[in-house]
Image (cartoon, rainbow, N blue to C red):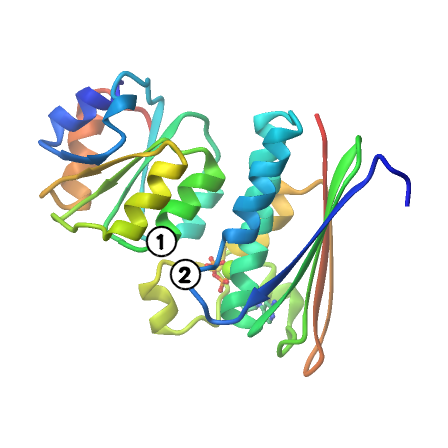
Amino acid sequence: MPDNVLTLHYDIEGNDFTSAGEASGDVKRKLRMLGISPNTIRKLAVAMYEGEINQVIHANGGHIDVEITPQLIKIVLSDEGPGIPDVEAAMSEGFSTATEEIHNMGFGAGMGLPNMKKYSDTFELETEVGKGTVITMTVNIE
Amino acid sequence: MKISEIAEILGAESLTGEEYYDLDIKSACGSDMMSDVLAFHKEEGMLLTGLVNLQVVRTAQMMDIRCIVFVRGKRPDDSILELAKDNDITVLCTKDRLFGACGKLYCAGMPE
Ligand SMILES: Nc1ncnc2c1ncn2[C@@H]1O[C@H](COP(=O)(O)OP(=O)(O)OP(=O)(O)O)[C@@H](O)[C@H]1O
Ligand SMILES: [Mg+2]
């Protein structure tokens, strides 16, 4: 691996609303120390946070790998959750399978995946029902 | 609009971050759904919400929101205030309901 690439790894606990967002907060802090522009950091942090929350709520946890190069930041969110049966529906604004309990925690508006797509420069989603989901996003550094 | 003016208009009590009272807030968002807040992308914004949990502060942290107003007199616990403090966020608490609090700020000239 070339030495101008920084990699980070996080394991995300399922159904834990206290630690949810810690990984994204940590990445945000590190990017700030690297002197990356606030706008780039915000886009990345929001996209990653939505993915992290989805792993907590929908996938019983997962893993996040972050790769920071001088040109871009790459985020790979992988989980061994239930997978997404209808990706087109899941990607549309307002679609959610979240329970009443999740709504009461402030989530389940069906905006997470659309937000991830909106804030990232490239977005790819692979999923298999019963196996899990892998989302790869990149955000270009301004 | 300065945070100090926001606090005065809402008759709000500050729970942490009074040192940022002179900060200029340029837009506001009122919602109990965090992804709605995350969809709204503006700089130097604030958040008014009836939801009280850690994820409200996380959401603000990701969005660079510097002021959170908890409505209906709801008081956050210490872990929420600690996280806000770590992220230089001012936390205000008002007795107004969400609609009323947003209306007052809107009438005072706060943009959406
Ligand atoms: N990692 C995942 N594993 C399994 N299903 C997922 C995963 N991520 C999303 N989904 C499914 O896709 C739907 C839409 O996700 P999205 O993030 O857009 O909305 P949400 O999480 O339901 O609500 P919000 O993100 O607005 O709080 C979810 O309700 C869920 O059914
Ligand atoms: Mg979501």
Would you say B10 lies left or right of B17 here? Answer: left
User: Chain ID for label 2?
Assistant: A
Residue at 61 percent across and 30 percent down: it is A33
Q: CA distance from mark 2 to mark 1?
A: 7 Å
Check whether the beta carbons of the residues at disc 2 and disc 1 lie within 8 A of each other: yes
Is B98 drawn above or below residue A101 in the view shown?
Answer: above
* Quarter of the rendering occupied by the C terminus of chain A: top right
Residue B54 disc label = 1
Residue A18 disc label = 2
Residue B67 disc label = none
| Residue situated furthest right in the rendering | A2
Q: Looking at the image, which is closer to me, B57 or A4?
A: A4
Would you say B64 lies left or right of B109 here? Answer: right
Q: Amino acid at mark 2?
A: Thr
Is A73 drawn above or below residue B55 in the view shown?
Answer: above
- The percent position of residue A55, horizontal first and vertical second, equals 57, 65
